[in-house]
C-alpha cells in the first residue's frame, strides 16, 4: 500500500523524534555516568527532552554527527585507555561530533545557497514577449 505524502511526512517526523530521543538520551546518560552522583537521572532526562526537540525540528544531520562522534570516541577510548574509559571517550566524541556537525551543516547550507544564487534563470519562464 502506498502512503500519502502527509502520512509519510508524519512517519518521518516520528522517526526523527525517536532517533533524537535515542541519541541524545544516550549522550545524556553518558554525561551523567561521567559526572557521577545523583546527576545521572537529570542528565538523562535532559538528553531525552533535547533529543525530542531536536528531532521535532528536523536536525537529522546533527543527530547523525553526534551518533558518529559517540561511536568513534568510544572506540578510540577503548583502544587507547581500555574498556573502563569507553563512557568518557563516547561523551567527548559526542560533544566533538555535535560541534563538527553544526559546522559542516552550516557549510553545506552556505554551499547550497551559493549554488542556488548562481543558477541561471530558466528562459522558458520568462515573461517577456519575443520581438517586442
Image (cartoon, helix red, strand yellow):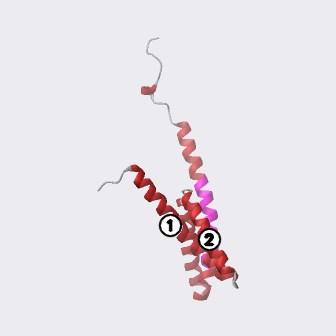
- Residue at the spot of label 2: 47
Image quarter where the N terminus lies is: bottom left
113 relative position to 124: left or right: right
SS assignment at label 1: helix
| Residue 68 seen from this side | no
Q: Residue at x 69, y 80 (%)?
A: 39
Residue range of the region highlighted in magenta in the rendering = 89-106
Tell which circle, 2 or 1, labels the residue nearer the N-terminal end.
1
Q: Gap in Å between the C-alphas at discs 2 and 1? A: 12 Å
| Residue 18 seen from this side | yes
100 magenta-colored: yes
Magenta span: helix, strand or loop, mainly? Answer: helix
Observer-nearest residue: 106 or 29? 29
> Which residue is situated farthest in the top direction here?
132
37 magenta-colored: no
Where residue 121 sits: x, y (%)? 49, 30
SS assignment at label 2: helix
Does 74 appear above or below 121? below
Pointers 2 and 1 in contact (C-beta within 8 Å): no
- Residue at the spot of label 1: 18
Observer-nearest residue: 83 or 48? 48
Q: Residue at x 64, y 82 (%)?
A: 33
Quarter of the image where one finds residue 87: bottom right
Where residue 92 sits: x, y (%)? 64, 74
Does 46 appear above or below 32? above
Q: Residue at x 69, y 84 (%)?
A: 36
Amino acid at each position: 500500500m502506498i502512503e500519502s505524502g502527509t502520512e509519510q511526512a508524519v512517519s518521518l517526523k516520528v522517526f526523527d523524534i525517536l532517533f533524537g530521543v535515542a541519541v541524545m538520551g544516550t549522550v545524556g546518560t553518558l554525561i551523567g555516568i561521567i559526572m557521577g552522583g545523583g546527576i545521572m537521572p537529570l542528565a538523562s532526562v535532559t538528553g531525552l527532552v533535547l533529543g525530542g526537540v531536536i528531532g521535532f525540528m528536523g536536525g537529522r544531520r546533527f543527530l547523525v554527527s553526534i551518533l558518529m562522534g559517540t561511536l568513534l570516541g568510544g572506540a578510540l577510548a577503548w583502544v587507547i585507555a581500555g574498556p573502563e574509559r569507553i563512557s568518557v571517550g563516547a561523551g567527548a566524541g559526542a560533544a566533538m561530533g555535535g560541534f563538527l556537525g553544526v559546522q559542516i551543516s552550516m557549510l553545506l547550507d552556505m554551499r547550497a545557497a551559493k549554488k542556488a544564487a548562481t543558477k541561471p534563470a530558466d528562459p522558458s519562464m520568462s515573461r517577456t514577449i519575443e520581438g517586442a
